[in-house]
Image (cartoon, grey):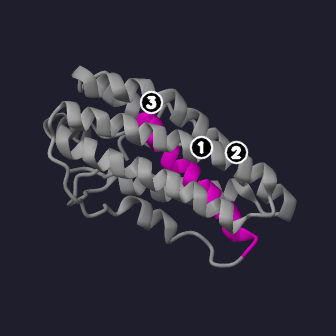
Amino acid sequence: MSGACAHPLLRTPTPASWLARACESSEVLLIDHANCEKKAASTALALMFAYAEDLDLAEKLSRLAREELRHYEQVTRLIRKLEIEPRRLAPGRYAQSLRRLVARSEPQREVDLMICGALIEARSCERFEALGSVIGGPAGELFHALKSAEARHFKMYLELARRAAARTGIDAAARIDAFADLEAELISGPDEVFRFHSGVP
């Protein structure tokens, strides 16, 4: 790992080498970030269907999905403004690797899915803050503006995870530790594909 991280949920900060690569690859960064916003909205909607009986969860995730889609629109407007040619990007390993740790059966699965969401949003928040000070220009301004929303999102997912765990007697702290350790390995380890949530390039 690359040292202590100021973010309360993360075990390691974004490596300096990733930030350097991000500054050199802003087109890929923005295209992949647009994809991330779509995936975040899609994930929120999928969880609403999976846990439809939980109206409090559905209300929170409905608002989140709408906000993620507004963020997607902001990113695509910037892509147009910068005259970046949109293209398909293969997904990186990050989210898929985290989801491999998610339990297949309930009630553990609900807790794990919420923790997974919390970590993804927490890493986005941490990277927005780091990028806002190094990438500059309109992309830096956008990332800085989105940081506070990601902070709210990770806290919401974490609250939902702890609530589900308390309801079913699951040790939320142990599951958070397991996911946070894996997340840190993905961020601090070598990664062949550069993406918004990738590891060391």
Above or below, 47 relative to 108:
above
Identify the residue at image location x=20%, y=60%: 192
- Helix, strand or loop status at disc 3: helix
Asked if residue 149 lies left or right of residue 32, the reply is right
Residue 188 can be seen in this image: yes
3 and 2 marks in contact (CB < 8 Å)? no
Q: Position of residue 131 (x, y in %)?
A: 31, 30
Name the one closer to the observer, 196 or 2: 196
- Helix, strand or loop status at disc 1: helix
**Is 120 colored magenta in this rendering?**
yes
1 and 3 marks in contact (CB < 8 Å)? no
Q: Residues within 10 Å of mark 2 (few under 14, many from 20)?
A: some
Asked if residue 71 lies left or right of residue 176, the reply is left
The mark that comes first in sequence, 1 or 3, is: 1
Q: Amino acid at mark 3?
A: Leu
Q: Position of residue 47 (x, y in %)?
A: 64, 61
How far apart, in angstroms, are the residues tagged by discs 1 and 3? 13 Å
Q: Which residue is mark 1?
A: 64
Q: Residues within 10 Å of mark 3 (few under 14, many from 20)?
A: some
1 and 2 marks in contact (CB < 8 Å)? yes
Q: Amino acid at mark 2?
A: Lys
Residue 13 can be seen in this image: no
How far apart, in angstroms, are the residues tagged by discs 3 and 2? 18 Å
Q: Which residue is mark 3?
A: 146
Q: Residues within 10 Å of mark 1 (few under 14, many from 20)?
A: many
Q: Main secondary structure of the magenta part?
A: helix
- Helix, strand or loop status at disc 2: helix
Q: What label sits on residue 60 in the rendered view?
A: 2
Q: Amino acid at mark 1?
A: Leu
Magenta segment, which residues?
Answer: 106-126
Above or below, 185 relative to 66:
below
**Is 116 colored magenta in this rendering?**
yes
